[in-house]
Each structure stands twice: as structure tokens, then as C-alpha cells.
Image (spheres, rainbow, N blue to C red):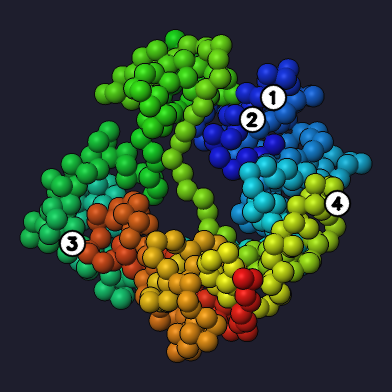
Amino acid sequence: MFCDSRARVEQLAVELRERQVNTFVSHSSLALDERRRAEDAFAQARDCVIVATSTLELGIDVGDLDRVVQIDAPGTVASFLQRLGRAGRRAGTVRNMLFLTTTSELTALTAAGLLALHATGYVEPVVAPPMPWHLLAQQLLALVLQRGGIGRNLWAEELRRLPEFAAAIDAGVGDAVVAHLVAEGMLHDDQGMLSIGPAGEKAYGYRHFIELTSAFTTDPLFVARHGATEIGYLHPIGLLTPDKHYATVLLAGRAWDIVGIDWGRHTVAVIPSGTGGRSRWMGSAQPLSGELCRAMRDVLAGTDPDGVTLSKRAVATLAELRANAPWAEPGTTTVVRDAGKTHWWTFAGLRANAALHAALGPLLVAGPQPDNLRIELDLGVDLQQLSRRLADLEADQLAPSPLAEQLADELKFSDCLPAGLALRIADARLADPPSVHACLAEPRRGWNGG
């Protein structure tokens, strides 16, 4: 059973065990021994359920799995195919997946759109993240550390072996990064010999520069231990109740009472609990692609996914969704005025909508941010006003995404880059010109629901 959050995995595992179902759990915040139990169950156990996040999508040599169950919907066709492929591996069986959408009608629409998109043969292309310049800075620091120092005129020949780094070096990005690192004290320049500077030691020297060995950041998790046994990892936001008492948490599919917290060592002492609890981890939902959002529009307009059996509840839910969106039409964006609000239903995906939202300026209503499917406009805006605003808009000349600043702050090694460079990387990774182009190229129409 796949869920797309660790908290959902834990809650579901507890509820299954309360019903005497032999249940195993796998997600990234479990201790290695706990994850290995789930992997062993994958290959050897019988009559059991494994509840997991995407940790079990890849790499496990599965045994005789009968059914994959997806709670709500993954965000990509590729993820769906990996999860579907966990079942039907042995002779005489077929791959099958049951979607159970539980949280809202939107998740049902997402699942139906995903299956409709898959039926067309579409799978997301593999595209390397653009501008890996923060990794150039990381590799430069690591090279200096490895060599104990390197000449300012020699490091480039070492790192340009990677084509992406070579392009950045030829464009002058490498020299700008070195100048910034020296200016900030990350590197020390002694007559052309680069070595780790005091700021570099302070930022990355902890535990023998272990932070230089990974290119991603992780939450400051606390290790949960029952006696000498390590259970897994908890985020500090879930350790205390609102009235500042120790919380009861879910981890490894069981409830635990916290009995002690060592804030300095980032450890939590727990004992088994007889009552339910909850766990929380920080995370953000992935934006949906323009291709998936347009497939969701096709479903709203009446398309049922091929090769899929719909339950009675699914049929009823889709019928209700379609009844609430009589304006939906394939290949068309719609300005809908209804219930005292005006929305431009773009079906372009969050990244494209964020860029379009930033470009619409005075046409927007104050406050609401765009989502994957629509942008809220000022109540008085009509189709003609929107079309005039968009007439001269170039998809590749939009302002930086308003989401870019947050991503730039979260980018590991962004402190190793000159001012503005991390923002350029973040904007390049959030930009979605193809979906913006597709949205602007589609005909637009208005619909007034009263």
C-alpha cells in the first residue's frame, strides 16, 4: 500500500494492526532494521501488508505480491508505473493497482487524470535539473579539502571533466564562485593557493566535513530509541503537544509515549503506548505537470481513462465533478465567474500558473495564490481584459517565479554562490515555458454561472 506522506503511512499501519493485519512499514524516517523488515517481507512473507512511501518504488527484488493499493494518487505517470510494477511479477499473474482516493474530490480527479494520461502512452521525460552551479561550488570545496589546497589556476581543469561544469566554467561562473568563496572566507587564497578558510570550516567542518558528502539537505530529525533499540527519526515539530507536554507519536506502525528528550544530542526516549498518537514531518507536495493537469481537464470534460474499472463510488464522484464544471472543454482555458468569484482555469500546472500569476498584476484578486489548475482574478475581470493582458506576453520572458526565493533559500550550498546566482538556479528549475506556451496557445472562452 503506497501513501505519499510518512504520517499517512504510520496512521494506516496502526489502523491495520488494530485489525490484526500482519503489517510492515517502510519510509525514510525509519531505522535501518525497521526498513529491512519490510524489505524481507517483500521477498519472503505471506499474507501480509507492506505500507510504504516511495521508498519501495525501486530497487527491491519483490516476491509474490498479489495487489498494489495506492492511497490517493502519485504525482507522475513514472511513479505510478514503478508502483504498478511491484505486483504481477510471477507467472500466471497480472499487474494490478487499486486506487483508493480518500482526502477530497480533487484526489479522485488527479487519479483519473493520471490514468487517462498513462493510457495515451505518455511518461515523463528524464530531464537533468538545470544549472547545477551550487554543486560546482561543493565539488570545488571538496577538491580543495581532498588535496589540502590547490592552485587557483588549476582547479578548473579538474572539474571541467563534467560537461555541465565545463560550460559553467567557460561562461565565467566558476571564477565568480571562487571570488565569492574567497571574499566570504569559505576559501583562503595564499598567493594563488586555495585552501579551506575559517568560514568554510565553520559552515561545513562539523564531523570531518560530512556535510560536503551529500548534495541535499535533510530535516533536523531526532533519533527515537526504545532502550538501546533505534526505532527511527522524528521531526521536532511533533515532539511536544500544544500545551508543551511530551507527545504520543506513531513510528514503525506503533504508538509510543515520549518520556525524555535530549535537545543537545537530538535523541528521544520512547516507550510503547496503549493509546493512539500522531507524527508530523515537514514536507511539501510536488507540483503537478501541465500534461497531467490537461488530462484532468479531459476527465472533467467527459473522458474516462481506458483500461480502468471504475467503482460505483468513482462513477458517482466523477459525475458530481463534471456536473460542477459544465464549462470544462478539452483544449480550452476558461474564465469562470461563479459564486461571487472569477477564476481563470488554465490547467497548466503550478509552475506555469505561478509565472502567469506574477505576470497578471492588476487583474488579480489580493491574497489567494495560484494552484495547479486555476488562477483567481479580480471579480470584475472579463475575458477581453485577460486576453489584452496576455496578448504581448512571451513565455520565455516572464518575471522570476515568486516561488524561486523559497527554493533558493532551501538549495544546499547556496551560501557558496554569489548574490543572485542561487535565485537564477531556482528560477530555472521552477520555470515551465512549455506549459506556459501551451496555455497561451489554447483558445480562451468565458463562462458566467451567476
Q: Which residue is mark 3?
A: 180
What is the distance, in whole Å, between disc 1 and disc 2 at their CAs? 6 Å
Residue contact between numbered discs 1 and 2, judged by CB atoms under 8 Å: yes
Whether residue 363 is situated above or below residue 65 in the rendered picture: below
**Image point (52%, 76%), residue name:** 436
Question: Which class describes the residues within 10 Å of circle 2: few (<14), some (14-19), or many (20+)?
Answer: many
Image position, residue 358 (x, y; %): 40, 72
**As shown in the figure, which amino acid type bears the numbered disc 1?**
Leu
Report which residue position mark 2 lands on. 12
What residue is shown at x 52% (from left), y 12% (from top)?
A: 272
Image spot of residue 289 (x, y percent): 58, 64
Give the residue at the far right of this rendering: 92
Q: Is residue 26 above or below residue 201?
A: above
Q: Which residue is mark 1?
A: 16
Query: Nearer the N terminus, badge 1 or badge 4?
Result: 1
SS type, badge 3: helix
Tell me if 87 is positioned left or right of 240 in this view: right
Q: Give whichever of 90, 239 is nearer the camera.
A: 239
Check disc 2 and give the amino acid type.
Leu
Give x and y (percent) for residue 262: 31, 19
Query: How far apart are labels 3 and 2 at the CA level?
Result: 49 Å
Distance between the alpha carbons at the discs numbered 1 and 3: 54 Å
Task: Tell me the crowding category of disc 1: few under 14, some 14 to 19, or many 20 or more residues within 10 angstroms, Cα based.
Answer: some
